Structure formats: structure tokens, C-alpha cells
Amino acid sequence: MTPSPIQALQRQRQLLEIEYASDKEDFLRHTEAIGIMRRVKRGDAWWPVRIGRSYYNSLNQLVVEIFRTGDEDIEHNFEFGRPISFFTFEETSSADRRPTTFTPLHPKLKSTVSYVDGDRMVVTLPDGFSVSELQGREHVGVQLSFDETSYRLMFEALDRTMRAKGRLAYLRDLFYSSQKADTLTFSPMRFPYLNPTQERAVNEVLRAKDVAVVHGPPGTGKTTTLVEAIYETLRRESQVLVCAQSNMAVDWISEQLVDRGVNVLRIGNPTKVNDKMLSFTYERRFEAHPDYPQLWSIRKAIRDLRAHRRRGDERWHQKMESLKSRATEIELRINNELFGEARVIASTLTGSASRLLDGMKFGTLFIDEAAQALEAACWIAIRRAARVILAGDHCQLPPTVKSYEAMRGGLATTLMERIVEQKPEVVTLLKVQYRMNEDIMRFSSDWFYGGMVESAPEVRYRGILDYDIPMEWVSPSGQSPVIPEEVGGVVDAASENVGGPVGTSLGAAAESETMGEESSRDYVEEFVGESFGRINKVEAEITLDTLEAYFTRIGKQRILDERLDVGIISPYRAQVQYLRRLLMKREFFKPFRRYISVNTVDGFQGQERDIILISMVRANENGDIGFLRDLRRMNVAITRARMKLIILGDASTITRHRFYRRLWQYIRGLHNG
């Protein structure tokens, strides 16, 4: 029996409670067990730090600057809105300078990242926090705290949606049923600068009265299409709300809209702080308002009055109330002007709960990265809108769900996936990609998109070298891949969990020899600390050897002249950090370092490079590939390359999984073709 919308949302809430409990327990256990120095290496803490100046920001919040002075090469996880806490280390003696004792500072007072740019961070301090005590301490550090706020907002959103009446209740019932979504009827509009499927997607967005989905596989111009749909919607509506799961995605689409001349008001600071991106944030606009200096003076007078209150001063309350009233009046006037002028209000999904948006309703909500957002997070923003436009790709990065039980229960099933399955008529698949050589694109298109994605003519045969093969698989162990049909037909059951190839076979059985260089060195994965990750040092060395050899073939001067850029990807953070250290030590790459970036799969989402190398890490006798089974992440990895993709991985381990076996066979077909 199909559950009712209310029952389905109750189930969502139960699964979210499981995830919350698991996430919190996991956070506390690891915080206590792994030690602060491991947290520093994981990017979850900075130590030591230098405390800079403190001041009141435009929102009248006390903030303090923090500078990382430790290992600055470590990729960190601090970003706008995340809660943090301070700590110190005590030392055993003057002779032994190694920190040994962890001491939290104000453990019950949680500060918040206001913004972060490289190794500089600005933190909003809570009431009751002593800045002078912080600035007077030595050996201070800062670490991420457990984020209660996001969970609280999602729980509240689910509860509100279950109780809802009116439009929110209508959308709730629509999204959980096979009922047809309402549409308008008009002749299609022409957009000569868009391809046919992009043009159709914009028209479907404009026709939708309830919901529409723009499904954008890699390189198909999803952002371009979404920006055009927003631009056209603004010809019919005075203001829209644009959200995404991550700050980076909100910043990116905001920047594209600003380039089109749209007045964007960004709620929450961008992750990357520069003048262009700050110029459309609420804080910067607020500070730039002509009435702000007057407001700042009144707020300073209020702080001074509080600090110098004299006992028995009967006029103190009268003065304070007068100043507060005047400050509130000016603040409301500034806000009314800022929100009145803005055509697009942009925020993360959780950011849409900001008190600044209290009481605001929008005709249309656009959610980018909808396939990466938990359904509960989407309902935070949906309550403010009459119709919803979802954009994303449920064949790429999924939402992060840490509890296996919650994942099995369906928490990772997104609202976009639900609507795609129940209402295929509201979905438009973008079918022309503008990023990859045809050979690189074809495997992804066949496996994930039913072979429906095609390459634009201008990129179909793009390459770096004449007679180069766009894809290679280097198997450093030199061992042959395992073909299940040859060992009794055993197929990795986990490979059946996420999709499957569409259409005909992608190639004959793989041949025994490997592609590229082979190595008989001690090639094996290592486990680096509990929950930190896996590393394969030999594969990391061979990854850089392979890139060096390819650079030599291209020619150093040509790389510099044409600014050919490279991405080195690994699913494991420990491998990423090891590769970064190796890269810095290699003299050969010194002239090219600004063109080479090393990151996780998630770190490359939405990006592209001329050359991509993927270090798969896993090499063991059991064929255990861990979360390489998450094929959507691998879809992201293999579709970042414009002209050359090199996969480095032990074929005998990895090809026991059906997806990777087919990928190996496909690449062999290119080499034998």
C-alpha cells in the first residue's frame, strides 16, 4: 500500500533522526578518539592560529579575525555558516615543546564562520565570549563543531510541511503522488543562442505552474540554461528565490546572473571572498547604503552607553530605548530598499531560513544542485514559493548520508529523484555536451544516460596530440583484470545497486596486458588512521610519473604557452594530500604548479580540466573497492576531462565490479580500434 504524503514525510523525519544521532555520535567519538592533530590533518581544525583584530560587523555582531599559521597545504573544511569552537594546548615543559593537553575554551559557546579566504577566517562570536581572553592566550586553535543548526532547520521544515495548509500542502501532495502537474499553454519561445534541448528546457520552466526539472548531465550547459530560465521568469515576476545545497553553487549562479545585469542580493557570504562576489552580498550592500554611517554611530553609542552605565542614572533607560528605536527604524529602511531593489534573492537551502526573509513569499523557487540536497533541506525553501524548478543530475554526486541504516531506508533519495520517477513529463534532459572529446563522453552517456547525450561538433574530436587516444588505464601492478565469466560467473552484487549499462556491450573481454607503464614495485593500498582514509604511495608516484611523461610528449613550452590545465583526482582525501606533497617536491612540475590542481571527486564537482588523472588507490587481493562502488561519484570523476583522461588503478582489484570491468573493456576497445 502506497503511504500518504504525511506518512512518507514522517518516514523521512524518522530517517533524519537516525542520521542525526549517528552523525553526532560519530562526530563526538572521532573528536575524542583521533586527537586534535589528526583533526588538523583532516582539515577539521587549525592549530596553531594567530588571533587578529576584533570589531563589530554590519550586522552589529562581534567578530574576530583568525589566521592559520600551521600546515597551510592541508585542504580544510571551514566555510561560511559552520559552527566552530576554540581550544588551547598546554605544554609539558620548556624542554619539550610538543602539545599534550587539549583544553576547550568556552565549550558551551559556539562561534560561527562568517567567511573564510585561504588561511584567513572571520568568526562571529556569541554573547558572553571574552575576546581579550582569547587574544591573550598562547597555542590557540579552532575546530569545527557539530552542526546542530542544519538538522534543526530540516526537522522544522518537515514538521511545517506535514502540518501545512494551502499552497505548501498542495505541493506536498503533488510531489508524493502520480497526479499530473499543472502547466500553461503557449507557443514555444525561440532562443537562438541555446541548443534545442536547452531551448525546450527554458520553455518547460516557463510553462510550469507547479514544478519542472532540468536534468543536466556533465558539460551540457545546465547553468547556462538555468540562468536563461531565471532571466525569462523575471520578465513575468518581480522577484525570485534561487537556492542550492552549497555556498559554492550559489556563488557561481549568482555570478552568472550578475554578469547578465540582474540585481542579485546574496544572503550569506560567498565561500570565496573577492570584491566581485562580495559586491552583491547583503552585508556589503548594507554597509554601502548611505544611511549606514548614521546607523553605525547609533549602534556605537548603544555599546558605549551599556559599558558606562552609572548606578542611579534614571535617564539611562530612556536614552537606551530612544537609541534602539532609532537604530531599528534605520535598519528597516535600509532592508526595505535592499530587498525592494533586488530581482533575485540567493542563498543556500538552509540559508533561506534566515530571519532576513521572514514573511517573504516568491512566485518561483529555483533549486540548483537539487540532486545533492536532502529532501528535508529542499522543504526549508519550498515553503516560501508557489512553484519549484529543480536543476541538477541525479547521476552525479548524491547527498551526503553517513548512516548506513538511514541510507538503506531511503534518506539519500532526493526530491528531484522522486519527481523524475513519478512525473517524467516535467523533466527535460539536456542532450548536447560542450566539454569532452566524444570518446571520453561516450561511456558515461551509454551507462548513465541511455546513450542520449551527444557531443557538440566543436568538441567532438578535440585533443592535445595527433593520434593520441583520449582515455588510458594504467594498472601499476601489471596484473590482469579479473573477468567474472572466467572465474565461475561471480559478479559483484554491489554493482547491481546503482544503475547499469544501457544498450550494447561496450567491448570485448579485456586483454591480459595493461595500458601505459607497469610496475612490479610493492603496489598495495594502506589504511591511514581510523576514518581518515586510504593511501597508495606507489600509485601516487606512478601518477606523477605518468603526468611527467605526458607533459614531456606535449612539450614544456607548449604547456606554458597554451596554459593547459590538469586535475589530479582521488576519491580518498589521504591520497589527495599525499599527492599534493609529492607534487611540491618534484622539481619537474615547478613551472606548471599553477596549472595543476589536486582534489577529491567532490572538490572537482562543476569543474573541468584539459587533462584529468584519477588515482583509484584500491589494490588488494579481495577485490574490495569500498566507496568506489558509488558510481555517481565516478561519473563525476571521468567527465571532468576535456581532452585526455588517464585512470590509474589496479585492474585485478577494481574490475571485479561490473562498472569498472565495462570501463576497462571500453578503453581497451579504443586502443584496439
Image (spheres, rainbow, N blue to C red):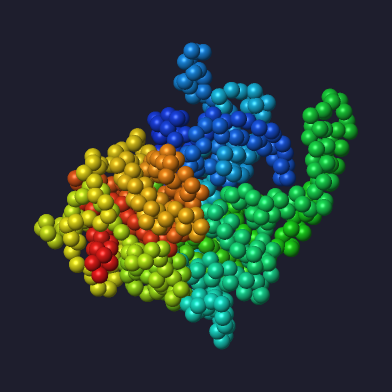
Question: In the rendering, at what x and y percent does residue 649 appear?
Answer: 28, 51
Which residue sits at x=73%, y=53%?
Answer: 285
Q: Is residue 422 visible?
A: no
Placement of 175 over or under 399, stated as above or below:
below
Q: Residue furthest left?
A: 488
Q: Residue at x 41, y 60 (%)?
A: 641
Q: Is residue 284 left or right of residue 398?
A: right
* Count of picture labels: 0
Q: Which residue is located at x 61 percent, y 23 percent?
A: 137
Q: Is residue 593 left or right of residue 323?
A: left
Q: Quadrant of the N terminus?
A: bottom left
Residue 120 horizontal/vertical position (percent): 60, 39
The x, y position of residue 13, in whole percent, is: 44, 53
Q: Residue 662 or 202: which is nearer the viewer?
A: 662
Relative to 395, residue 38 above or below: above
Say whether residue 266 is visible. yes
The quarter in which the C terminus is drawn is bottom left
Q: Is residue 203 above or below residue 604?
A: below
